[in-house]
Structure formats: C-alpha cells, structure tokens
Image (tube, helix red, strand yellow):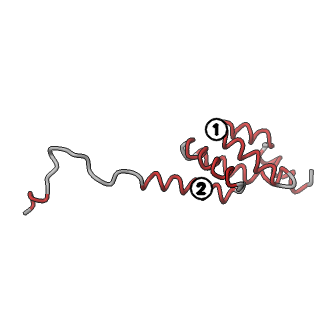
C-alpha cells in the first residue's frame, strides 16, 4: 500500500469491509452502492473518503431516503459522492414539497366572512 494511502487506513482504522458492514445497516441498496464506489477507484484506499461521506449522510437522514437514493444511483450507473448527495437532497426536498399546503377542516377555524 502506498504511503499516502496508508494515512487514511491508519487515521480512520477502517477498510473496505468495515465500510461495507456499516453500509448494510442502511439497506441493501446502500450496501451495493458502497461496493460499487469502492470498485471504481484504482486503489480501494482512495474510496474511503467518499464512503465515509456517503455513510455519514445516511446517518443524518431516514434510511428509506438513503436506500432509495442509492437505488437510483445504481440504476443510473453513477457511483460518486456528489451525485449521491444530489439525489438524496432531491428526495428530501420532494418529500417536503409534497406535504399538504391546506389546513385541515375544523369547526373552530374562522372563515373570511368573520373579518368583513
């Protein structure tokens, strides 16, 4: 292992198997996505920073969103941190905009006639 790559291994005490194991906790698509990310680099140590970033994003969001974002990236054959982040953000924003904008029907809500 080159000296510059050994830094990440020693600093993080993580290897490809550790990232794959961590990814399994978020779902099968996240696991498969992390496997693909690791496989896209010439040396697997180069992928550790991307894997770390992806899995930390998954930690801060619902597992279903993370798994869905990974599935979409896998179907599109896109295996980068940046594209995963864009997809996850897009899914979260879509969820926020799909919320109902109207108030629920309630007998105590005053209508516009009350203020005339």
Closer to the camera, 1 or 35? 35
The percent position of residue 106, horizontal first and vertical second, equals 19, 44
Q: Residue at x 67, y 43 (%)?
A: 30
Pointers 2 and 1 in contact (CB under 8 A)? no
- Which of the 4 quarters of the picture holds residue 35? top right
How many numbered callouts? Answer: 2
Neighbour tally class for label 2: few under 14, some 14-19, many 20 plus, Cα within 10 Å? some
Q: Is residue 75 above or below residue 18?
A: below
Residue 31, position in %: x, y?
70, 41
Q: Residue 87's mark?
A: 2
Is 113 on the left-hand or right-hand side of 89?
A: left
The first of marks 2 and 1 along the sequence is 1
Residue topped by disc 1: 27
How far is disc 2 from disc 1 in space, using C-alphas?
16 Å
* Left/right of residue 63 with respect to residue 2 in the rendered view: left
65, 48: nearer the viewer: 65
- Kindly state the secondary structure of the residue where label 2 is placed: helix
Q: Secondary structure at mark 1?
A: loop
Q: Where residue 29 appears, x then y in whole percent?
A: 66, 42
> Which residue lies most toward the left here?
116
Residue at the location (32% across, 54% down)?
Answer: 101
Residue sitting at x 87%, y 53%:
43
């Amino acid at each position: 292992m080159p000296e510059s790559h050994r830094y990440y291994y020693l600093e993080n005490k993580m290897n490809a198997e550790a990232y794959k194991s961590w990814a399994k906790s978020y779902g099968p698509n996240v696991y498969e996505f992390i496997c693909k990310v690791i496989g896209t680099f010439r040396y697997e140590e180069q992928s550790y920073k991307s894997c770390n970033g992806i899995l930390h994003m998954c930690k801060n969001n619902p597992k279903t969103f993370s798994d869905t974002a990974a599935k979409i990236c896998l179907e599109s054959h896109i295996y980068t941190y940046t594209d995963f982040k864009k997809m996850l953000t897009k899914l979260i924003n879509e969820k926020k905009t799909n919320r109902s904008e109207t108030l629920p029907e309630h007998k105590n809500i005053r209508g516009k006639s009350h203020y005339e």
